[in-house]
Amino acid sequence: MNDGSTPTALVARVHALGSPDQVRLDPVPVPSPRPGELLIAVHAAGVNYPDVLMIGGSYQTRTPLPFVPGHEAAGVVAGIGDGVSGWSVGDRVAVLAPGAFAEFLVAPAQAAHPIPASVSVIDAAATWVCHLTAYHALRSVAEVSAGETVLVLGAGGGLGLAAVELAAIRGATVIAAASDPRKLAAARARGARYVVDYSEGDLRRHLRDIVGASAVDVVLDPVGGSVSEDALRELRWGGRFVTLGYASGDIPRIPLNVVMLKGVTVKGLEVRTFAAHDPEAAERDRREFTELWEAGRIRPFVDATFPLSHVRDALQHVAGRRSVGKTVVLIRDDAGRGM
């Protein structure tokens, strides 16, 4: 904040669509919470691949300029709007809300959740988007049961690695597919029974060597591109394919005759709107997920941290697919000291 009459805070803001180099730090007035909202002093924020897509103007929907990217933050409650109960100033909080790359943000109170005492703000900032998306996909969309075989594409990224961990917790046999030895090692450490390096080509042959022909029950695909059809073709009859995003930059065109002949179900999940369309399932999933989180059964794999002054580097780290698991921006100096 400055010494003037109006307190200000720094935000990382996008003024023109393009590469992460378009992001710049701007001082803005500290916002005030409106009724039903919390003001949060952000200590750490998770970086997700959709942030890169939004900055580049290639996400499924466009955000009007200028905007502050980031949707995953953790910090402390700094202000409470009218009509909000159950929170006190100073409470540690994780939140899913736009504008996370900022020293302060306002968010609906229902988008916030207390951080368990055993969880650091860095881990809290790296958990909600990917792990909750993966939990919705496994629990409500694919309805994965213990003993089923789940193929996770892009298994070394934040969403993919979360899906590996949660599918294993649900008792599934997990096949993790990625294109980097470090990512495959991380997936194995998070519970994958088998790993496939699809940079070597012929994903279908690798899958058949592992589990046999057309033996996969569920595919979770946050990648898109050519591997999507290969994975679809190795589903068993009646299997389920869940599309979660297109990190490859290529939205696949799947052959409907394969869907017909195999009797498979193809579903999609967009986590920002899931609760609006299925509030009962969303509430159940969040409750179950929170129980796992508070019990210490899930923890994000944080690959790298960057200070807010290097937010461009953090975004480039993710854009270049160098990140294993999650990358986190440290908004405040004390974020990395066990807060």
Image: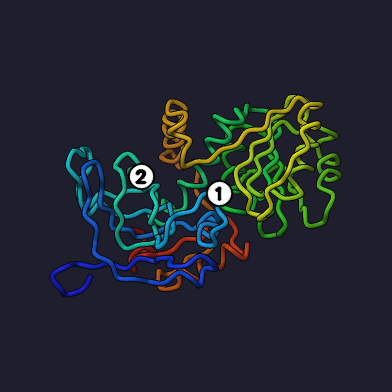
Q: Position of residue 200 (x, y in %)?
A: 82, 56
- The one nearer the camera, 21 or 45, is 21
Q: Write the residue at 86% across / 44% down.
A: 205
Q: Which quadrant is the N terminus positioned in?
A: bottom left
Are dots 2 and 1 in contact, CB under 8 Å? no
Q: Position of residue 261 (x, y in %)?
A: 81, 26
Above or below: residue 18 compared with residue 156? below
Quadrant of residue 242 in the image? top right
Above or below: residue 315 compared with residue 188? below
- The one nearer the camera, 124 or 255, is 255
Pointer 1 residue: 60
Q: Which quadrant is the C terminus positioned in?
A: bottom left
Q: Position of residue 22 (x, y in %)?
A: 48, 70
Q: Position of residue 204 (x, y in %)?
A: 83, 43
Q: Write the residue at 34% across / 47% down.
A: 117
Q: Write the residue at 63% across / 33% down.
A: 267
Visible residue check, residue 285? yes
Pointer 2 residue: 116
Query: Can you tell which of label 2 and label 1 is closer to the viewer?
Result: 1
Quadrant of residue 337 in the image? bottom left
Label 1 CA crowd tier, 10 Å (few <14, some 14–19, many 20+): few
Answer with left or right where residue 222 lies relative to residue 299.
right
